[in-house]
Amino acid sequence: MTSYDQDYQRSITDPNHFWKEKAQILDWIKPFTVIKNTSFHKEDFRIKWFEDGELNACYNCVDRHANKTPNKTAFIFEANELGNARSISFKDLLKEVCKFSNVLKSKGVQKGDVVTIYMPMIPEAAYAMLACSRIGAIHNVVFGGFSASALASRVDDCDSNMIITADASVRGPKTISLKETVDVALEESKKNTVKTVITVKHIGSKCHMKEGRDFWYYDLAKFMETTCPIEPMKSEDPLFILYTSGSTGKPKGVLHTTGGYLTYVAFTHKTIFDVKENDTYWCTADVGWITGHSYGVYGPLANGTTSVMYEGIPTYPDASRIWKIIDTHKVSLFYTAPTAIRSLISQGDEYTQTTTRTSLRILGSVGEPLNPEAWQWYHDVIGNGKCPIVDTWWQTETGGMMLSPQPHGMNLKPGSVDKPFYGVKPELVDNKGTIIIGKGSGNLIIKDSWPGQMRGIYKDQDRFFKTYFSRFPGSYSSEDGAKRDEEGYYWITGRVDDIINVSGHRIGTAEVEAAINNHFDIAESAVVGVPHLIKGESLCAFVILKAGSLKSNSIKGEVMQIITRDIGSFAKPDTFIVVPSLPKTRSGKIMRRILRKIATGDHDNIGDISTLSNPRIVVKIIELMDHKG
Ligand code: WTA
């Protein structure tokens, strides 16, 4: 047995002892005596970890390092333009976070309030998150690529009373006005719960400031003390909500709590990246996504790690930017998404040849399957053939990494996410819920709780149980499909529900269809995901026009504008096609499986269409697609 096998067995057979020991990675204000108190069964459903313990997440991420290693760098901020980097030490981080906390308090923010953060990738985004956790407020970070409508609906859903934003962000050659979007969102907001907007002046753009509501952050901060007491939080007190797409209905406010989440992200980060004192770590994910929360802010800071934060895009000013940042700051641990890797492969080798990347020690991947060709390039070219790759499978809901190799002493198989992390009990089941033993493929479920697990959907506990625990009673259903080989290695095959993963962004087909259907001339639509060489998947939209509407050439452009308005431009379909009707079952359900086959050109394997109410439509749509192509 390897040491991984031994530790894994221990974590599964005796979770209480295992997690009691591992939770010492944090400093607790009041030590816990109860460890795991969980059940996935309807009768006694509960998920609680370390419930009688008390701690503060910000203290664990900032103060304790500021006390021990005040001059160690917490963040290296690399701006959009080359040569504009600056370092923030743990001591400085503590001061900045305290000032931010005092600003929030001066505007009336209290423990339990929801503060929305709509920020670019700048240090103030992390300060704002940590300030919330310092004073016990719940942050709700909304990705800066979301539109005003998407922001408004998220703010309304959680009754947030404050928004923290920046004037604008610069990404490559583009300037993105964030404050302007906030203004529009607040006009659209139905509940008007937001009383205060705090804006960080980042690039100096002019903004409209509404009297009594809008304040410039640094105008307030300059009067603030650089110390601020921490709020002791119960282990199960909320830390944050983060909206994510589901297969039906509106986005869900995924709720994470304090003690279990922070233990889990700190411990997974330390173990999977084998973090050492002198490492420089870079997670490229935006703070607007879960990876940015768990492995851009909370995990690395809890471990006192030096992290790079980069505002710009991988291809600005050219496709060597990422590798240059790695060389300049001697990055040793690098965590990114397959879509970024694939898009950089496609730029050709000249951009890697001007850099050495010799500082790298471990490479990580997350968000979508890392195909073996991309794995090989990442390994051979980027890592100079000497860095293990940790391909980590997890979800917004899981809080942290669930299936992943560990960098030492485990076999690495290109394309595989390897084996479960400590304390994680995966199984594969068929659609009836029968457990598959040994080699096979099926639905990936998790049989028991782990500390980083989400605790609920904000204000909708019934939906929480129904979404994740009712399909396979007694288990958490991941809604991902997976294969397992004879040696017990897992391979993720992708979502089994109607979520599409475009460049690592989770997009619900229902949300895109709802946006498309907002066009006056559209009667109905169906969106499916098709494989894409770089993005992993792309969206293909089939639409039916209302009877009598004149099919205009402008409809595609108009629909794209609506999607950009309602969701954000990252959710625009690559393919858009007007069809006379959609393949449906007799009970009226759209057969997406068939549309997916048509969209991928897999015409010979469409399967049985006799159950359709309108089988002839299949040939018609194929003709339309061919004509288009
Ligand atoms: C997919 C991102 C294959 C999966 C952390 C999951 C992956 C969804 C991997 C969650 C991986 C994530 N290999 N697929 N290593 N990591 N996924 O919530 O389909 O944005 O369900 O969390 O991304 O996306 P989310």
Image (spheres, rainbow, N blue to C red):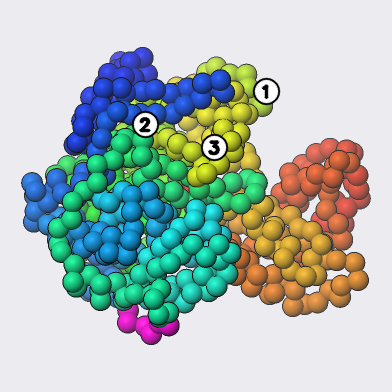
Q: CA distance from mark 2 to mark 3?
A: 18 Å
Residue 119 drawn at (x, y percent): 38, 65
The label nearer to you, 2 versus 3, is 3
- Label 2: which residue? 451
> Would you place residue 32 above or below residue 201 in this image?
above
Q: Nearer the viewer, residue 368 or 588?
A: 588
Residue drawn where x is 77% and y is 77% of the image: 553
User: Decide: marks 2, 3 in contact (CB < 8 A)?
Assistant: no
Task: Point out the tag, 1 or 2, that comes first from the N-terminus.
Answer: 1
Judge whether residue 603 is colored magenta: no
- In the displayed structure, 556 sits above or below 567; it is below
Binning the other alpha carbons within 10 Å of mark 2 as few (below 14), some (14 to 19) or many (20 upward) gives many
* Within-10-Å neighbours for mark 1: few <14, some 14–19, many 20+: few
1 or 3: tag closer to the N-terminus: 1
Residue drawn at x 18%, y 55% as measured from the top left: 228
Query: Disc 1 on helix, strand or loop?
Result: loop
Q: Is mark 1 within 8 Å of ligand 1?
A: no
Q: Is residue 557 left or right of residue 140?
A: right
Q: Earlier in the sequence, mark 2 or mark 3?
A: 2
Q: What is the quadrant of residue 331 in the picture?
A: bottom left
Three-letter residue code for mark 2? Pro
Q: Which residues are magenta?
A: 203-208
